[in-house]
């Protein structure tokens, strides 16, 4: 996959993420919930930590620590996109992770926290709220795992020899 295509996919994820967060913040008050279905709400919440609110109760140092990790990851992903440009599924997965990491990094640097608003639940159990960027990172990671198993299976399959 050409680098400009991978970066375009990442940019599209970033735009969708930032636009959705802007819409939610301009529509809802912090903590406000809008029921959509019997298992899904929109809720405006902020996460100063990482996934599943990891480090969210810290004094603020996590903002720059997590931003640094995201910045390094973004640079490495761009290098990998260029190095492995012939592996399309791998590049697609990296592009999704790149777009998601960029969206959450933007929030973390400009706001000091990540805006989350997608709230799925079963009964009284609520999955931690997340956003479009988190979804793109998850899908990208899942595609990478799928790709690794697919490649392993192709390598393990015996090659047929003519008799």
Image: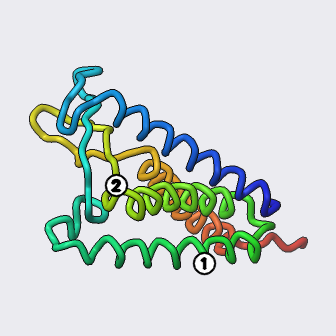
Residue 120 vs residue 135: left or right? Answer: left
How far apart marks 2 and 1 lie (CA) works out to: 22 Å
Quadrant of image for the C terminus? bottom right
Rendering coords of residue 98 (x, y %): 57, 62
Indicate the position of residue 93 as horizontal and vertical percent values. 60, 58
Residue 61 in the image: x percent, y percent? 26, 77
Which quadrant holds residue 49? bottom left
Give the left or right position of residue 48, taking residue 1 as reference.
Answer: left
Q: In the displayed structure, would residue 69 be above or below residue 100? A: below
Q: Residue at x 36, y 73 (%)?
A: 66
Disc 1 crowd, CA 10 A, few/some/many (<14, 14-19, 20+): few
Q: Are marks 2 and 1 in contact (CB under 8 Å)?
A: no
- Per the rendering, the mark at residue 40 is none
Q: Crowding near pointer 2: few (<14 within 10 Å), some, many (20+)?
A: many
Image quarter of the N terminus: bottom right
According to the image, label 2 marks what residue? 114
What residue sits 41% from the left and 64% below the top?
109
Q: What element does badge 2 sit on? A: strand
Q: Select label 2 or label 1 by which is in front.
A: 2
Residue occupying the point 74% across, 73% down: 84
Q: Residue furthest right?
A: 162
**Quadrant of res 27:** top left
Q: Nearer the viewer, residue 49 or 26?
A: 26
Closer to the camera in the image, 102 or 38: 102
Colouring rule applied to residues: rainbow
The residue at the point 24 percent across, 28 percent down is 39
- Residue 76, which numbered label? 1
Mark found first going from the N terminus, 2 or 1: 1
Residue 158 left/right relative to 116: right
Residue 117, given in percent of the width and then of the height, sits at 31, 39
30 w.r.t. 77: above or below: above
């Amino acid at each position: 996959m050409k680098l400009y295509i991978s970066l375009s996919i990442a940019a599209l994820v970033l735009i969708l993420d930032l636009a959705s967060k802007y819409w939610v913040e301009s529509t809802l008050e912090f903590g406000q919930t809008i029921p959509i279905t019997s298992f899904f709400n929109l809720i405006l919440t902020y996460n100063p930590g990482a996934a599943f609110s990891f480090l969210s109760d810290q004094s603020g140092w996590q903002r720059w620590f997590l931003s640094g990790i995201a910045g390094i990851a973004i640079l490495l992903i761009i290098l990998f996109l260029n190095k492995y440009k012939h592996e399309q599924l791998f590049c697609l997965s990296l592009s999704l992770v790149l777009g998601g990491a960029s969206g959450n990094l933007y929030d973390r640097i400009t706001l000091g926290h990540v805006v989350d608003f997608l709230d799925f639940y079963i009964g009284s159990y609520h999955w931690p709220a997340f956003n479009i960027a988190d979804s793109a990172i998850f899908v990208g990671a899942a595609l990478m795992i799928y790709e690794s198993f697919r490649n392993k299976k192709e390598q393990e399959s015996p090659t047929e020899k003519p008799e």
